Amino acid sequence: MSSTALAPPKPLIPLPGGTTMRGVLWQAGLAIVVVLVGWSLYNNMLANMAARGLQFGFGFLNRSAGIPIGEHLIPYTPADTYQRALTVGLLNTLRVALLGVVLATILGILLGLARLSANPLLRGLTGGYIEVIRNTPLVLQLVFWHAIVLQLPSVRQALNPLPGLYLSQRGLKTPALMADTALFWAAVAVVVALLAWWLLLRRERARQEATGDRRPTWAPGLALLFGLPILAGYVIGAPTVEWPVLAGFNFRGGLTLSPEFFALLLGLVIYTSAFIAEIVRAGIQSVQRGQWEAARALGLAPGRIMRLVILPQALRVIIPPLTSQYLNLTKNSSLAVVIGYPDLVSVANTSINQTGQAVEVIAIFMAVYLIISLVTSLLMNTYNRAVALKER
C-alpha cells in the first residue's frame, strides 16, 4: 500500500486566492441574500401598514398616551406621552428584576447549601420543595400567589409580623427612608466603607501570596460597614424614617408594595431560587472530595473551607448557568401582565391597541430586553473573569 497522502479534491470553479477567497464569496453571497430578504419583508410591511391607513415611524411616541398606570417610579399622568409611559413600564420592569435577582440569589444559595446538609430531614424537605417549584409552570405560581395576597386580611386587620411592617389585601407596607441630606451622606458612608473593605481584601490577598499568611477581614469590614454610617449619622444627623400609620381605611406614609408587585416578586424569587439552588449544589459537588480532605488536614474550619477552598473552585461552574437564570428572571417578569402589574410589556400591549403601531412598539421592547440581556451578560462575564482561577 502506498504511503502517499491523497490530494485534496479540486474545486469545480478555481478562484484566485484559494480557500480564503471562496470563504469571502460565500459570506458575501449570504449577506446579499439576508439584505434582499430583509428589504422584501420591509416593503411588505410598509404595504400592509399603508393598506390599513398606518405609516411606519416613531412619531406616535410624542403623542399623549392616555394610559392610567397605577405604579410609577417617576411622576406620570395619563396626559403624558407614550414615550413617558413606556419609560415608566421599563422602570417597573427593572425594579422587579433587580430586586428579584438579589433576593433569588440569597434564597437560592441558602437552599443549595441546605440540599447538601448532613441532616436528612432538612435535605429531604429542601429537595421536595425544589422539585415541586421547578416542575410547576411559573404562570400558575404567579396566579396562585396573587390569589393568596388578595385573600389576606383587610387594612384594619392587617398582619403585623414586625414593627412597621403590615401585610394586607392592599399589599405590603414598610417604613421608608426620606430623601434628605442625611440619607445622602449615609449612602456615601456605605460606599466608602465598601471601598475600604475591598482595599483591605486586596491587601490581605497580596500578603497571603507573599508570606502565606492571611488575616480575617470580616470583623474590620463589618465595623467599617456599620461604623461609618453611624458616625455620619452622629455628625450630620440620622436619616428620617417615615413609618406607616393606619388612618381611616388605609395606611398613610411609608413605602407601599402593591399586591401585584408583591405577588410578582414573590413568584419570581421562589421560582428562580429553586433553579439557583440546584446550580449551587452542582457547583459545590463538582469540587473533588480530595479538596475537602486536604483543607481539613491543614486544620481549616468548615466555614473557611467552604469560603476559601470550595467556593472559589465551584464559582467557575456556578456562574455561567447563574447568568442564564438572571436573564430568565428578567424575561419572565413579562408574565406580569397575567396579574395586572404594569411592566414594559403590559404598557406596550396597551400602546399597540391604542395606536396600531405594533411593529414599532414590539421593536422597542425587543431592543430593550436585548440591551438588558447584553449588559447582564457583560457584567457576569466580567465577574467570572475576575474570580477565575489563574494558572501559575
Image (cartoon, grey):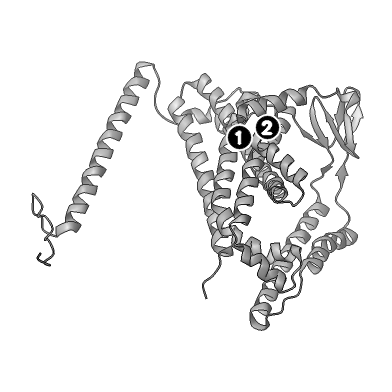
Q: Residue furthest bottom?
A: 211
Task: For label 1, count other residues whose C-alpha is less than 10 Å away and answer few (under 14), some (14-19) or many (20+).
Answer: many
**Residue type beneath disc 2:** Leu
Q: Are marks 2 and 1 in contact (CB under 8 Å)?
A: yes
Percent coordinates x, y for residue 204 in the rendering: 70, 75
Is 237 placed left or right of 225 in the picture?
A: right
The Cα atoms of the two marked residues, 2 and 1, are separated by 8 Å
Taking the spot 73% from the left edge, 48% from the top edge, the residue there is 114
Taking the spot 73% from the left edge, 68% from the top edge, the residue there is 196
Q: Nearer the viewer, residue 233 or 308?
A: 308
Secondary element at tag 2: helix
Percent coordinates x, y for residue 9 in the rendering: 11, 55
Task: For label 2, count other residues whose C-alpha is less than 10 Å away and answer few (under 14), some (14-19) or many (20+).
Answer: many
Q: Nearer the viewer, residue 57 or 7?
A: 7
Percent coordinates x, y for residue 287 in the rendering: 60, 60
Q: Is residue 170 above or below residue 385?
A: above
Taking the spot 88% from the left edge, 22% from the top edge, the residue there is 249
**Residue type beneath disc 1:** Ser
Using the rendered view, name the quadrant where residue 47 is placed: top left
In this orientation, does residue 75 appear?
no
Question: Circle 2 sits on which residue?
Answer: 264
Q: Nearer the viewer, residue 374 or 54?
A: 374
Quadrant placement of the N terminus? bottom left
Question: Circle 1 sits on which residue?
Answer: 333
Q: Nearer the viewer, residue 154 or 138?
A: 138
In this orientation, does residue 326 appear?
yes
Using the rendered view, name the quadrant where residue 328 is placed: top right
Is 31 placed left or right of 168 in the picture?
A: left
Is 36 placed left or right of 127 in the picture?
A: left
Q: Residue furthest front?
A: 1
